[in-house]
Structures are given as structure tokens and as C-alpha cells.
Amino acid sequence: MIIWGSGGDIVPLGAAGTQHCATCESAREFRDVLNYRYAHVWYLFAWVTEKAYVTACSVCGRGVRHDSKAFEAKLGRTPIPAYRRFGGLVLLGLVATVVLAGMLAGMRSNVREDALLQDPRVGDVYTVDLQEMAPGSFDGHAYGLMRVVAVDTGTVSLEVPNVGYNKLSGASGDLDKQAREADYYSGEVLSYPRPDL
Ligand SMILES: [Zn+2]
């Protein structure tokens, strides 16, 4: 579950001297203050959504708002804790890492499948779309397992199974046990040129 929300904070930046306050209509102490708001995901991952540097009257709070970039340049720093500013980037980095790791794992498994198809062995079991491999044998698209019974230089011979599934996961579910039994297959054998696999 994603928990998200927002918050705000006020950072005092020191005295700004005595000035005339138009609201109080008298001389007041003024202070430099930063008001900012942030959004967060799971509290840990935050980013700043709004900030205002203000020189404000210490009594009524009214004052002048400054340009943020210019004020930060004058300060020489941004007085907001790093975890409130860059937490969101850390989260983006984590998400990117997970996505990348998933893509790499997918690529590796494709490479492994290609290597297995390049070098078929008797007893290998393939998960196939039976509609493609044995047109007409099954009613529409069906996924199933075919077992390699013979390999020669040009062709690979595959046993046709008795069962087909309309979902890939159904066929994969048989990979462990049933696919090893002889009566899982109909006895029909089809041969394919190796480049077609
Ligand atoms: Zn005032």
C-alpha cells in the first residue's frame, strides 16, 4: 500500500533589523523566514512542492516575499534538510533499479531459451502454441508441452501432447511432473526443420 501526504515547515533565518511595518503602522523587528511545503511517499521519500523566502514582521507576520533563486544565492545554501529535498529522487532511483533488474533478468532468460533452442536434446520439453505447431489438432489457440524425441542435423521431432490449455500457465504447470510420463503424449510425432523452432 502506498501511503502519501504532504507537510510544511518554517525555518527561521535570522534577524533582518528594525523596519517600519505598514500593517502594524509602527517600527517592528523583522526576520528572514523560509516557508516551504513538501509532499512525501511513505514519509521517507519527500520532495519540495513550494517555498517562499520572506522578510516578515515579527508581530503581524506580514512582509516582503523574495525571489527564491536570488535569495538562496545570497544565503549560499538551501536551508531545507536533504531528506525533504532529495528523498523523492532516491525513490525514483530505487524504482528505476527494480525495473532495470527485471529487464535484465528477462533478457537473461531469453538468452538461455535461445541457447536451449539452438541445441535441442532428446527429452527436452518445450512449451509451445499448439495452434502454430500442429494446426487443426486443437480447437483454436492452445498452449501445451511437446517433447523432443529425435534430433538430427536438419530436423527436430516433437511428440504431440494429449492436452492443451488456453493459458500459458496451464501448460507450464505440467512441466514438473506429467510431462515426464509417456502417456502424457498422444504418440503422434511431428518433425520441424531446425531453423523454424
Ligand atoms: Zn507588523
Image (spheres, grey):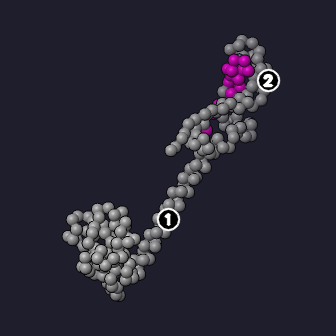
Q: As rendered, which of 107 and 58 lies closer to the eye?
A: 107
Q: Quadrant of residue 162?
A: bottom left
Q: Is residue 70 above or below residue 113?
A: above
Residue 4: percent from the left, percent from the top?
54, 39
- Asked where in the image residue 129 lies, by quadrant, the reply is bottom left
Q: Residues within 10 Å of mark 1 (few under 14, many from 20)?
A: few
168 in relation to 61, above or below: below
Q: Is residue 49 visible?
A: no
Q: Earlier in the sequence, mark 1 or mark 2?
A: 2
Residue for point 68% across, 24% down = 64
Q: Position of residue 92 (x, y in %)?
A: 56, 50
In the image, residue 155 sits, relative to residue 81, either above or below, namely: below
**Which residue is more in the foreground, 36 or 167?**
167
Report how far apart the C-alphas of labels 1 and 2 lie in the structure.
62 Å
Kindly identify the residue that appears in the image at 30 percent across and 66 percent down.
143
**Marks 1 and 2 close (CB-CB < 8 Å):** no
Q: Position of residue 117 (x, y in %)?
A: 39, 77
- Please report the residue visible at 68 percent of the width from the left and 14 percent of the height from the top: 23
Q: What stretch of residues is rendered in magenta?
A: 47-64
Q: Residue tagged by mark 1?
A: 105
Q: Label 2: how many residues lie within 10 Å, few (<14), some (14-19) or many (20+)?
A: few
| Residue marked by disc 2 | 17
Q: What amino acid type is highlighted by mark number 2? A: Gly
